[in-house]
Amino acid sequence: MAAIDIVSLFTRSTLLPGSTVPVADIPLGGMYHAMMRPYSPVLGICAYLAMVKIWERRNARQAIVVTKGAGPGSTRNSQGTGSAFKAIIIAHNLVLAAYSIWTFVDFFPAVLRNVQMQGLKDGFCDNNWALRNDKLLVHGFLFYLSKYYEFIDTAIILAKGRTAGRLQTFHHSGAVLIMWLGNYVQSPYLAFFVFENSIIHSLMYTYYTLTALGFKPPGKQILTRLQISQFYVALSAGAVYSVLPGCQSGPQKLFTYIFIAYILELIRLFTEFARKAYGVRQPPPTLAVKKEA
């Protein structure tokens, strides 16, 4: 039944019944219907993956030239350097830090308000669209658009002559698809992605801004652990949504299952990254389970 419902949704180009907020009244609302059509995330993700592939091949060719001892100006180290590039990195991280802080400060009180007014279950499920009509429509859509902007994260890595890697490409392309589908079916589960991710990104992009400015703040490993922790919290919320009766429509349930699968893969990839980046502590002889450093 959920599969039939989701297929029928792909013929829609307007909001599902229930929302009382005109899309023209939200920031960048003029882009809403175009960006919410099914082909928009597909084209965006394909363009992103093509960019990564082409740029990585270019970097590989330049690395070969360096290895063969090409002349000055051809070195790989010349990529991603200079004051202009540094200014772009600072501006990019500052924009995302400021946006994430604003999102959390504006959205989280609305979540608390909704729970206080409706009770835990009704506030959690948002069956009367109170949170959707208050803040989730606005922040859900803007957060979806921000995931396209975050493709610049990968562009910065590639501009430095490095490869993107599966974690980077899966994380960013998956976020676009998840945010689009969550907005498309107007899932209440989307609220967790917005307020949780805005907290982590507020910290993360503030940290990146400071490092780009030349500071060396502590806590990089803590940030990675916080990223992984947010996935476990979102996973727990998804499990609750999956079993609460009358909480979601068929398409919304399907979105929840897809979101959970996405989160599980992110947990695996981020955990693998943390082990490679920070190493693992050897456990005492009596312990059979390895612990991360």
Image (cartoon, rainbow, N blue to C red):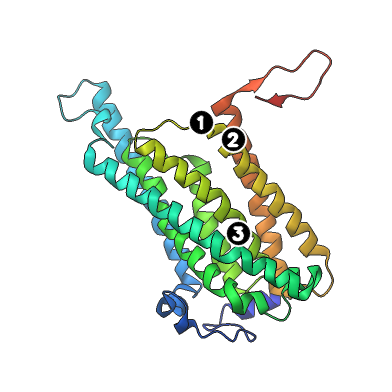
Image position of 281 with respect to 187: above or below: above
Badge 3 is on which residue?
195
Give the structural element (helix, strand or loop) at label 1.
loop
Asked which secondary structure carries label 3, the reply is helix
Q: Quadrant of the N terminus?
A: bottom right
* Gap between marks 2 and 3 measured at Cα: 19 Å
Q: How many marks?
A: 3
Which mark is on residue 222? 2
Question: Identity of the amino acid at label 3?
Answer: Phe
Which numbered disc covers residue 218?
1
* Mark seen at residue 202: none
Secondary structure under tag 2 reads helix
Amino acid at the residue labelled 2:
Ile
Who comes first in sequence, dot 1 or dot 3? 3
Q: Which label lies toward us, 1 or 3?
A: 1
**Mark 1–mark 3 CB contact (< 8 Å):** no
Q: Residues at badges 2 and 1 in contact (C-beta under 8 Å)?
A: yes
- Residue at screen point 80% across, 71% down: 119
Q: Earlier in the sequence, mark 2 or mark 3?
A: 3
Q: What's the distance in space between the residues labelled 2 and 1, CA to CA?
A: 9 Å
Q: Quadrant of residue 95?
A: bottom left
